[in-house]
Image (cartoon, rainbow, N blue to C red):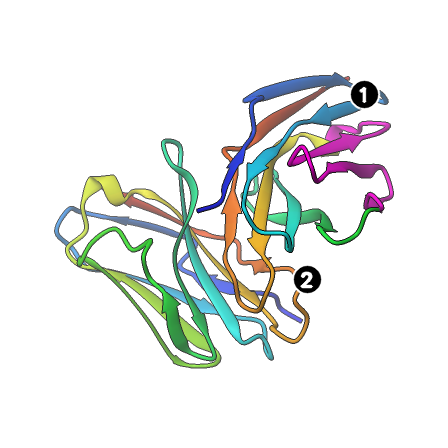
Amino acid sequence: AQTVTQSQPEMSVQEAETVTLSCTYDTSESDYYLFWYKQPPSRQMILVIRQEAYKQQNATENRFSVNFQKAAKSFSLKISDSQLGDAAMYFCAYRSAGYGNKLVFGAGTILRVKS
Amino acid sequence: DAGVIQSPRHEVTEMGQEVTLRCKPISGHNSLFWYRQTMMRGLELLIYFNNNVPIDDSGMPEDRFSAKMPNASFSTLKIQPSEPRDSAVYFCASRIRTGVANEQFFGPGTRLTVL
């Protein structure tokens, strides 16, 4: 079974600065997808960014980018120019390739943004 | 699009009572997932359906939990009888299966409190 580990229970960043959230995963599969979800206090789960394992290029979405290291099974999220609205719980998630497969989530990292 | 709709948003009940949580997936989506979020166990998949058929219910805690999807636009998660340890936030998510990388869209969740 696949597992996802987020080793940082909590992180803090100053507004306008950059922060990196860590995620590692364990799998024997070669084809899969990785995601970062944001959960603000409203509890709504919001997709931040996704990465297909077969793509070598790291995904980027505006201020959010990932560092995907397939051999190391590492998938970190970098948030640049942090904003107060970025404060939330962030979850790393894994999904096997194929249709209809479930997401396996990490334990989450609470991100606090200081003004 | 209204997104994934869950009802009720909050439910407070007493131990032993039956609880029914409801979900309406996004129109056209043919995979539906039920997740539970607790402080102790994080986000865990309970069950998921493809084309209204349950595919994996290995996450359902015990026989007190049951889920149905009578049609493509409605699903229920029932707990009978409820226990205090069932207190959690329950999320429903849906996804369209035509693209393997397509994301799951989450509903706002139902916060269940069992006294």
Q: Residues within 10 Å of mark 2 (few under 14, many from 20)?
A: many
Q: Quadrant of residue B113?
A: top left
Residues A15 and B99: in front is: B99
Q: Is residue B81 above or below residue B23?
A: above
Q: Position of residue B24 (x, y in %)?
A: 48, 71
Q: Position of residue B8 (x, y in %)?
A: 40, 59
Q: Which residues are magenta?
A: A57-84
Taking the image as drawn, is residue B26 in sight?
yes
Whether pointer 2 and pointer 1 mark residues with C-beta atoms closer than 8 Å, the reply is no
Q: Quadrant of residue B66?
A: bottom left
Q: Residue at 64% of width from left, 36% of height from top?
A: A73
Q: Residue at 65% of width from left, 47% of height from top?
A: A34
Q: Amino acid at mark 1?
A: Glu
Disc 1 chain ID: A
Specify whether A52 is left or right of B113. right
- Same-chain status of marks 2 and 1: no
* Mark number displayed over residue B101: 2
Q: Position of residue B86 (x, y in %)?
A: 26, 45
Taking the image as drawn, is residue B115 in sight?
no
